[in-house]
Every structure is written in C-alpha cells, then in structure tokens.
Amino acid sequence: MSEQQQEYSLKDYKGLMPIWCPGCGDFSVLMALQKALQHRQVAPHKLAVISGIGCSSRIPHFINAYGFHMVHGRSLPSAAAVKVVNPELEVIAAGGDGDGFAIGMGHFPHTVRRNPNITYLVMDNEIYGLTKGQTSPTSHTGLVTKTTPWENADEPINPIMTALAHNCSFVARGISTDVKQLTQLLIEAMEHPGFSFVQAMSPCLTFHDTYEMVRNTSKDLPEDHDVTDRLGAIKYALDTDNMWTGVFYKVRRPTLDEVTTRNKLKALERNTKSPTPLMKIYADMGGKVPTSTS
Amino acid sequence: MTDKRRKSTTIRLAGESGEGVVSSGQILTDALIEQGFAILTYQTFPAEIKGGHCWYQVRGSAHPLDTPGDRADILVSFNQEGFDTHIDDLRSGGLIIYDSDAVTPVDVPKAHLFPVPIGKIAADEVGSPRSKNVLAAAILARLLGLPEEELADSVTKKFKHKGAKVVEVNVKAVTAAYGLKLPEVEMDFALTRTDTETAEPIGAYAMTGNDALVLGALVGGCKFFAGYPITPASTILEAMMRELPAWGGSAIQAEDEMSALTHCLGASFAGAKVMTATSGPGFSLMIELLGHASTVELPVVIVDAQRGGPSTGLPTKYEQSDLNAAVYSGHGDTPRIVLAPSTVRENFDLTVKAFNLAEHYQVPVILLTDNALATRLERVTLPDLNTVEVEDRILATPEPDEKHYKRYKFTENGVSPFPVPGTPGGMYVCEGLEHDETGKPNYTGENHVAMNNKRYGKLEDCARRETGYYDFGAVDPDLVIVGWGAIAGTVREAVDRLTGEGLHVGGTVITMLSPFPLAVRDRLRKAKKVLVVEGNYTGQLAQLIEAYNPIVPEKLAVASAGLIPVESVEKVAKRLLNVQEVQVRE
Ligand SMILES: Cc1ncc(C[n+]2csc(CCOP(=O)(O)OP(=O)(O)O)c2C)c(N)n1
Ligand code: SF4
Ligand SMILES: [Mg+2]
C-alpha cells in the first residue's frame, strides 16, 4: 500500500501528550509502537492497550485506542481475556520491569504457557521510575539506589531466559535508541500468532541513566541465528558480555483464543447429542439450546 | 421426627473418610430422591485427602425441608470415633447402627442399639468388602420404609456403568440388608406420604447450591469465567470449565485469585458478562482488584463461598464470617453490591440477579454463599428458564468520529453508557486513577467529590429498586429472628415451631447486605425484640444492623464449625420472650 492509500496516518494513533521526563526512553518506544501500528494499519477502535502501573504503564493515555490502566502488575491476565472475548481486537499489554517482573511476575510464565495471541511490550529501565528510584528486579548486581544504599546484592531477573524457559511463542529484544529496529520487532510481534514478548531497553534519565550501558553492550543478533533454535537462543540470552537485540526465538503453538474457540465449537456440537448436565436441565425446562450453527 | 405436621427422619453416618460414609449416604439420598421424597443434606469432610473423620447427614421427608435437621433419628457408625463423637447428637429414643466388629458401644440409656457385623456380612455373605456402603444404605432405606425392589432398582441404575458383576454384588447386599432381623423400637422412622392435598410441592431437581449457582450464572448470560481451585468453590470452577463452552463462553483456570479476577475484568472491559468464584483466602487476595472494578465501573460477579477463617482456617467447614470483608473491604470508598442467597433455589435466583445488577449498575457484585449451602443437596423447583429476566449493559452509541468520548458521563442514576471496544468513536481509557468523565486522570477535590457521588448514586438507586429481604411468621411480632445465608433455614424452622406454640415470633432473612435494604428498618424498628442468628464469632450481621438502625439486637453468633441447631435458636428466643420452658422437645 502506498502512503496515500493508507487510511490511518501516524497522527491517528496519538493520544494525550506524554508526561514523561524529557529524554526518557519511553518516548522512543511509544514512537516505535505507533509506527508499527500505522504500518499494520490497525484501526484505533479495534486496538486495545492494557497496562499496569509505572511511568511506562501510562502509555494507554498516549495512544488513540481503547485503553485499560489496570492495577500494578496485572496487565497480562486482563489483556489475555480481552483477546479471548474478542479475537478481532489487536491487543497490546505494556508496562515496566517492576510491573512485569516483580509484582506481576506470577502472571508472566503462566501467560507464556497459555499463549494468548497478544503482544507484551516491557519498557525495561532497570529501576522503579514512578516511585522515584528504587531497585527493580532487573537492576544489575552492585547497583546503588535509594533502597540499596550500600549495594544491590541480588541477581537480576533475565526476562528473555524466563520467556524461553516456558517456550514463549515469540521472544525479542530491542532498544529505545534504535526506533527502526524496535518498530520492525513490534510489527513482527503483532503479526506472530501467539504470545509475543518484546523487551525494550528504555533508560530512565532521571533515576538510572543506562544510555551508555545500552550503547556499549547492545549488538544485533547475528544474521545466521536460527530463530527456531531454542537452545541457540538460550545461549544468546545467557551472554552477560553482550546485550543481543533482535528476534531470539519464534514457535507456532496453538493460541489461547484458538483453543477456547475450538472448545466452544466442540461443546456446541455436542449440545444436541449429549449435552452437559446443566444444559440438559435447561433444555428440560424449556430453554433454547445453543448449537454450533445458532 | 420433630413435628407432627411435617414428619421427617434425619440420618447421620459417621466414620473414617474413605470407608464409604459419604457414598453410603449418597446411595440412600439418591434412592429417596427417586422415590419422590424431599431431602436436604449436610456433609463435612476432613481437610486431608486420606483418612480423617467425616460425616454425612441426610434428612428425608414427604414435605419440603428447611434444614438438614439438628439431631439424628438414626446414627450409623462405621468405627469407634464415629460412635463416640456423635452419640450425643442422637435423639432420645433414636437408633444407633454400628459395625459390631469395629465398635464397642458405651452404655447409652436413651438409645436403641443395633449391632450389625457390616464389614463381615459384606465380605463373607455378599462376597465383596466394598459393598459395605450399599449394605448400610439398604438397612437405612428399609427403616425409612422403602420397598426392597425399589432400592434394588436404584442401586442397579447407579452401578450399571461399572458392569454386571458390580451390579450383581450390590443387589446381593440389598437382599442381605432386607433379610436382617430389625430391633424393636418405638419410633417410626418410615416416611409416608399422607394428606396429599395439603402437601406443598417438592422440587423436581435435586441440586447442590454450587450447581444451582452455576446454572444461574449460565442462564444469567455469563460468557467468561476464571477461577483458582479452593474449597468449597472448586466445584463451581469445575462446572464452569465443563459447561461454559457449551453455552458459548470460555473459562480459564488462573494461576491465583488475583489473576482470576484480573482475567474477569479484562473480559468485562471487552463487553462480556463475567464471574469468578473463590472462598475467603482467595477473596482476601482479590480486594485491591475489587476496588479497581468499583472505580473503573466494570460489571463483575464475585462469588465468595465462605468457609471457616481467618487464614487457611477450617477449609471444609461451614461458617459465615466474611460479611465484613464483603461489605467493607478495600481501601478508599468502594461501592459494591453484596447479595446473600439463603437456599439452593436462591443460589439460582440471586446469581441471575447478581448478573442483572452488575450489568445494570456497572458495579462489582459479591455473592456470599457458604460451605453448607454450596455442598448441600436440596430439591428445588426451578422457574421457567425461558422467561427468566436477564438484563444487559446499556451500550454507548458514539458518533464514529467522536473525540474524547465521555465513558464516565454524569447521569441521573450514575450509570454511564458503556462503549464496547471495537465501537468507532468510543475510545477511552478505563482508568483506576481518579478520573474525569473522559477517563483522564484528575485529582482535584471537586472532581473526586463528583465521581464519588456518581459511583455511590448507583448504590442508592439500587437500594430503592431492590427489596433485599423476606419475612415470615407473625405479622406483628414480639420477637423478630433475623438470619442470612444457610442459617436462614434454621431461623425458618425455629419460627415455624415457635409460632406453632402460639408465640408471636417472626423471621426476617436479609438477602442483600450492601446497599442495606431500606424496608428492613421498619420491620426491625417495630419489633419489640430482635435476635440475630449467624455462624460467626463477632456477630457481623448484628453489627451491620446496628449501624443502620436505632436498635441494639440480641445475637446468637456461634462459630463452631457447624450449623447452629434449631433447638438453640428456640431456647434463646424463649428466654428473650420470658417463656417458661415446659419441656425439651425430643
Ligand atoms: C500494589 C501496589 N504497590 C505499589 C505501588 C507503587 N508503585 C507504583 S509504580 C511502581 C514501580 C514501577 O516500576 P516499573 O514497573 O519498572 O515502571 P517504571 O516507572 O520504571 O516505568 C510501584 C512500586 C502500587 N501502585 N501498587
Ligand atoms: S522517572 Fe524515569 S522512567 Fe519515569 S518518566 Fe522520568 S525518565 Fe522516564
Ligand atoms: Mg522500571
């Protein structure tokens, strides 16, 4: 499609003015997401953006879409359910490293397992931004923050590894300083049927400036990396010297909405032959039994 | 056999879990159902999977029943513990059947003993030690007056799927039971159908409270369910996983209760009617999200099937101690509707209502049931399921190119039309931060006041629309006995007996705990005395009543891992009415 034929321009995806600090990495992540949406020509009214709480989690307000600002850490289960109820919607879950890998960590592997056809975008600044600079689950060992005044002794979470451990359907990492690559990754993530996890390194200039670290250690995954090779992907995920960017891994698994739709068809078909116990009572009492054609 | 007008027989079976106590009770219950008798059961399992003491009570009658009965007319004990633990609950003049090889009876002056070598007969005479349960059930059926052929039929039906051999053995057990010599007793345990013209109808379906609740949800239009296993709500999750796809919906087993409710909120945001079900511990985990649902104005039905608390508490026991949590829990001012069904039929009706109110007002509705109600089997009459009134959310109809759609528009009753994602022009952010009409965060005092008014305005409207209680007994009573939940049946039976003795006693069952029903105030204010009966330690309903009425009710609040006996309610009522107790009813 040429530019003129496109129904939606970048402007159509803009919501309220972002209220992030000047220089915050999240501006670029937002830009990449809007570009990816525009590339895919997602109708704004068919887009749902669901987040938790944090600076990054404010993102639903900055996009013209149906937004849902959940409580802290709970974007994933609600995003998955939105897709189950209405598979026609493009569903994006978004948030920060604290939101996703501390308070919301319980939901991450389970959402990976269930494989809803949604995209999960984590803006990872390795710090708690909104609460003003406490250590986060992805803060590196040794980091001094307001809550680790001597040092952070903990091993950081490795989100890419966690996703790979549970056979996540699509795993990628981008950086806010490379909007072009991040846009491409988000396009691929949305196009991939299944749960697509994108970790976007997105520095917090105010409380933990990781721009230099990102610049110095990030590296595109080699051209010959086989995205269907899970063990190969794990090798790159475990590399502590380089922060690899690009698509780590891709696998086609039945998605949650495919499974729920399949179950529905199976059950509706059985309604006429051998109905479930309560459907039988319903039919006895004059209820109109739904069938696969009704 | 408490009452001449409504004859009934109460049977209790007790023993080690896994010994056939429950299956034996169920075989008898099924036979009674097939023979058209009313039944009402009460069961308590050990919280452990293997071993532990358990008992099962079933009351049968030709008339509708309100409670599973206080004392047993017949007690069956498979082991010594069963004998020792329950002998005091046997009615004077009642019968105790026990396995004579497993139990050494203590001297029981008021009871008749019926020693039967149950285990031995099952093993030697019938040829299968496992037929113990059918043997015991058949002895009971015989005492209740069921003919041998009818029981044999019922057993054949029940075991048909296990093959001819199993059927044969179990029919043999029935024959053995009917061949036993019965002891002489004065009491007549047989259930007879007399005065058919005056008999009230007995429901067509025997259902547990949880099954009725699930049927209510399905008829009410539920299209999405998520839950995490917990006693006694697990059977709701299991039923939903099985049923919902057949009704065109989807169910998910979540990784915890926060995930369960979060899934539901996502699905509700997408436009579906949703429900989750849990018990106290899970409900506690949901409370941040409950407040969220309230402030983002998403319809959701949350079932709390209460059990003994706090903490892990008494996982398999009846208690009604989550009222405060349901009515008050959460930070901030959090409007919610709380409904409390009091019978299995009401589990159906109020679940439909819960969906209707949730959708109409766009609020979370908590449905408070309890272990006794969830697990008990009762005969119910269902309404014509085609004509059950089902309400839908008021949907928004924005202009396709509308900007900054007012999702939280101020309206007369506080309800704003709902834009379903996918609708052009309705885009907004469903926002848990305090927000303005468009969903944009707004922390001004003026806006917060207006939004609280809007959200609480919906509850005020609901209080005007809903009755939220029902009455029975004397019209102008000296004493009103108030109950809620499973204990309501106890109140009804107590009021029946007391009015039968000519006392001016009335009963009030509160079925809506938030918003507090307005008309209850009049009834309570006019009564000379009020007694609140409930299964918790602190008297949570009594406190709620006190908060809304210029009265201080008397209370009979007992948390003793079981239903309060009707006898206890009668006694307290009489003390309050200063009636000399003539004799203890036996
Ligand atoms: C239940 C709960 N606990 C704590 C908070 C406070 N809180 C808000 S955001 C946040 C951390 C945000 O960090 P992150 O997810 O990394 O987002 P960022 O601000 O860095 O983008 C915390 C702890 C909260 N809102 N809710
Ligand atoms: S505090 Fe950090 S993360 Fe938050 S807006 Fe400012 S720069 Fe961004
Ligand atoms: Mg962060």
Image (cartoon, coloured by chain):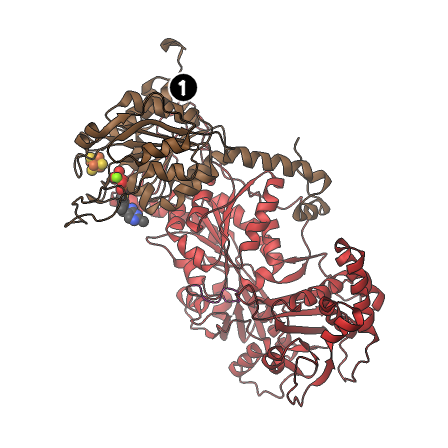
Circle count: 1
Residue B335 locus on image (x, y percent): 40, 51
Q: Chain of mark 1?
A: A
Amino acid carrying mark 1 in the image: Gln
The N terminus of chain A lies in quadrant: top left
Q: Is residue A186 left or right of residue B358?
A: left
Q: Nearer the viewer, residue B57 or B511?
A: B57
Residue B247 seen in the current view: yes
Question: Which element carries disc 1, helix, strand or loop?
Answer: loop
- Compared to residue A64, the image places residue A164 above or below, namely below
| Residue interval drawn in magenta | B312-319
**What residue did someone put label 1 on?**
A41
Residue B15 locus on image (x, y percent): 62, 73
Q: Nearer the viewer, residue B395 or B432?
A: B432
Residue drawn at the location 45% of the way across and 73% of the way down: B553
The C terminus of chain A lies in quadrant: top right
Quadrant for ligand 1? Answer: top left
Per the picture, the main secondary structure of the magenta-coloured stretch is loop
Residue drawn at the location 53% of the way across and 46% of the way down: B356
Residue B186 painted magenta: no
Q: Nearer the viewer, residue B196 or B28?
A: B28
- Compared to residue A65, the image places residue B432 above or below, namely below
- What tint does the image give chain A? brown
Residue B72 locus on image (x, y percent): 66, 77
> Residue B169 occupies which quadrant of the picture?
bottom right
Residue drawn at the location 23% of the way across and 25% of the way down: A177
Chain given the colour red: B
Residue B266 seen in the current view: no
> Residue B280 occupies which quadrant of the picture?
bottom left
